[in-house]
Amino acid sequence: MKLVISHSDFNHEILYFDEINELLKTEEILLGLNRVQNRNIALLINPISGKRKARALARTVLKPMLKMAKIKYEFFETDSPSYIENWVGQFKEKSFPFSDIICLGGDGLFSQLINVIANHPK
């Protein structure tokens, strides 16, 4: 499973992990994210990723960390291959409300997101 954390200052962290102990190492990174005011994170989860552990990791680890850091976030769970395209597509007429996106999933979720964003009209 891969966790990609992209900061609005164009820095990013890519962490690969197999167990929850490895994911806990992200706490320091997530707590450091609160340097930007008005941060609002989109937390995108592929629930079947990581032997179906991604949902539980998001709820038991990521959400509590974001709450502890007092960072606003919205939780989005993919449910189909077209989910990311539809999700990004809803922002065509309005500005993108998120300062950052955290993807919890495998290469497929991350690849879909990058491709959809790259092709999205600015």
Image: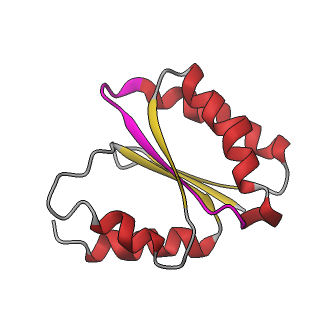
Q: Position of residue 119 (x, y in %)?
A: 27, 77
- Seen in the image, is 115 located left or right of residue 14? left
Q: Is residue 14 above or below residue 117?
A: above
| Residue ID at (80%, 45%) | 22
For the N terminus, the quadrant is: bottom right
Q: How many marks?
A: 0
Q: Is residue 50 above or below residue 94?
A: below
Q: Nearer the viewer, residue 107 or 51?
A: 51
Image quadrant assignment for residue 106:
bottom right
Q: Position of residue 71 (x, y in %)?
A: 46, 27
- Seen in the image, is 116 located left or right of residue 94? right
- Seen in the image, is 53 located left or right of residue 98? right
Q: How is the image coloured?
A: secondary structure
Image quadrant assignment for residue 3:
bottom right
Q: Nearer the viewer, residue 35 or 117?
A: 117
**Residue extending furthest toward the front:** 79
Q: Nearer the viewer, residue 69 or 22?
A: 69
Q: Position of residue 107 (x, y in %)?
A: 61, 73
Magenta range is 35-48
46 in magenta: yes
| Residue ID at (82%, 65%) | 51
For the C terminus, the quadrant is: bottom left
Q: Position of residue 87 (x, y in %)?
A: 38, 64
- Seen in the image, is 50 located left or right of residue 2? right
110 in magenta: no
| Residue ID at (14%, 61%) | 93
